[in-house]
Amino acid sequence: MFSEELFRRSLSLSRVAQPIPPLMSNRAVPVPVLDEAALTARTEQWFAEYEQKIAFYAEHGFDIAWTLDWAKKYWWSWQERDMSHNHELYAADLRYKDVTTLGATIVGIDDFVTYNMAFFDAIPDWRYDPIPGQSYLDITPEGTVRMVVRYQGTGHLVGPLRLHPYDETAIAIPGNGAFLQCTAVDRYTFGPDQLMTEGETLYDMIDALQLTGMLPGPSTRAFRWLMRGAVVANQARTKLGLFDGDRFGALPR
């Protein structure tokens, strides 16, 4: 049974393998890296701020206290890789999209878990931490609750990151052992039974690949030549009429 004690215990655990660099340097401006103590402190702050948000909504006649319980259980389940409470978190017909689905929609809890586990297979020390002051709640006139959360993901890309459909046939981003700390945005929609019915994860794939060193940094000559090459390729495709979706949309496997 999930409890506050389990949540607090998970908060105290160290997850990210060493070494952790002080800076993410493959950017236009070097970005300072947050260590695990700082990440945990920010997560604790996020949950404390969310309790204040719940109290504010209650003062205005909206009872959303259940969303805090949901958020703790959701965060804990992925930090612990424990899927035993999925039926308390997601609708059976959950629909979800991610950058790695390449436009496809994940349908159902089992496929949602498979998608998430693809990240943990590639980044076994992955942790994600919501960023204080960067979550947003919306309640429609019909009573539908929707949430947007910006968070920070941290870990080492040691294995191949499979894209949709996340099986042995899938295209994969190779693992190179690089440390990665980047931001993403999740959005969730909840049904009347307080389960997530629909969601999406959005992030900058080019940024992530540059952070791992698989793409050259934005201020390098190599990146400029890469972008110029893309322009030339697009011009050639336009002349040849290759932007028709049926002729150009599919990638070979």
Image: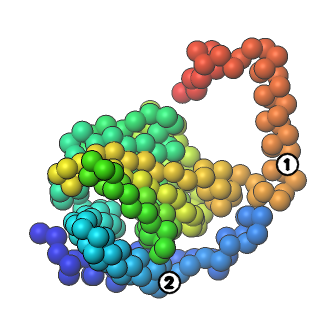
Q: Would you say 156 lies left or right of 70 here?
A: right
Mark 1 and mark 2: Cα distance apart in space: 35 Å
Q: Quadrant of residue 65?
A: bottom left
Front position in the image: 57 or 168: 57
Q: Which mark is residue 2?
A: none
Colour pattern of the rendering: rainbow
Q: Amino acid at mark 1?
A: Arg
Q: Is residue 243 above or below residue 23?
A: above
- Residue at figure coordinates x 73%, y 64% from the top left: 26
Q: Nearer the viewer, residue 229 or 199?
A: 199
Q: Is residue 79 left or right of residue 178?
A: left
Look at the image and tell me in which quarter the N terminus lies.
Answer: bottom left
Residue 205 lies left or right of residue 132; in this view the side is right
Q: Which label was assigned to residue 38? A: 2
Residue sitting nearer the eye, 197 or 233: 197
Question: x, y percentage for residue 180?
Answer: 57, 65
The percent position of residue 110, horizontal first and vertical second, equals 26, 43
Q: Residues within 10 Å of mark 1 (few under 14, many from 20)?
A: some
Residue at screen point 81% across, 50% down: 223
In x, y percent, where is residue 51? 31, 78
Residue position marked by numbered label 1 in the rendering: 224
Q: Is tag 1's residue or tag 2's residue first in the polypeptide sequence?
A: 2
